[in-house]
Image: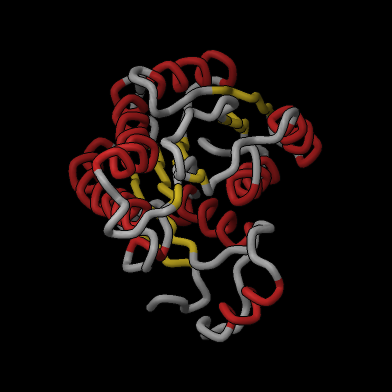
Amino acid sequence: MTGADAGIGRAIAEAFAAEGAAVGVHHHATARPLPDGVKREHHMATEGAPTSVVRSLRALGARDAAALEADLAEDGAPAHLLARTAERLGPVDVLVNNAAHCESPDDPLTAGAGGLRRHHEVNVFAPASLTAELVRTRTDDRPLSVVNISTDAARAFPGQTAYGTSKAALEAYTRSAALDLGPLGVCLNAVAPGPVQTGWMPAALVAEVELAIPLRRVGTPSDIADATVFLASQQARWITGQVLQVAGGHAL
């Protein structure tokens, strides 16, 4: 799975490990420079984080685990990443596209071509390329499952124009690709998290956000992980093309 070194991605990786899966822990070690005045909102992995995650996955019961570095915005990176994953862990049955790019400012007046391109390279182009490569390189007729991690900001979120529209494009891709890939034995779905506490929300913001959530709490990474594992499981074998909002009722 991509972006598995921290936060929601790590929780998803750990949930699969607890089910006895072999898990590829994708991470990106080197931040690309951004234009002056632009801030990256999704932080890079801390040094040693992928190794720590791999140890954690093995302790939780993973059949195997491996850290795999790649810059998904580079041409050819998705194909290379899948090839290395299969070589190290065996055939890939489940692909979770969790890696994301998010930057600020990101309002309609600042989201120019550069910002839109940077968001779409990671949030749309990479998942589409990984999915296509996974299906193209399948050597048998085993069923495949792809789960894309979106956001409820894909519906509408002030101040996140490029990020939100890139995730909306990912959801549109999910529905469209599910129609074409279903006859090939591929289930393709998305999970759209609401506000999830991964350490970025101070207590005052949590209290404010909870008032806009019908279930009156912010999400935890495990909330998203459980939904992702379900969509990749045999229990979801007749579900495809769906965007499952996991948000406590936020942004309905």
Q: Answer with left or right where residue 160 lies relative to residue 196.
A: left
Colouring: secondary structure
The quadrant in which residue 245 appears is bottom left
Quarter of the image where the C terminus is located: bottom left
Q: Position of residue 196 (x, y in %)?
A: 58, 63
Above or below 92: residue 112: below
Q: Residue at x 64, y 37 (%)?
A: 5
Q: Residue at x 29, y 29 (%)?
A: 132
Would residue 171 be seen by someone viewing this image from the given angle? no
Q: Position of residue 74 (x, y in %)?
A: 38, 22
Would residue 187 be seen by someone viewing this image from the given angle? yes
Residue that protrudes farthest toward the front in the picture = 36
Above or below 61: residue 243: below
Q: Residue at x 41, y 47 (%)?
A: 148
Q: Residue at x 51, y 44 (%)?
A: 40
Q: Answer with left or right where residue 168 lies relative to residue 61.
A: left
The quadrant in which residue 135 appears is top left
Q: Position of residue 34 (x, y in %)?
A: 45, 35
Q: Position of residue 17 (x, y in %)?
A: 67, 40
- Counting labels gives 0
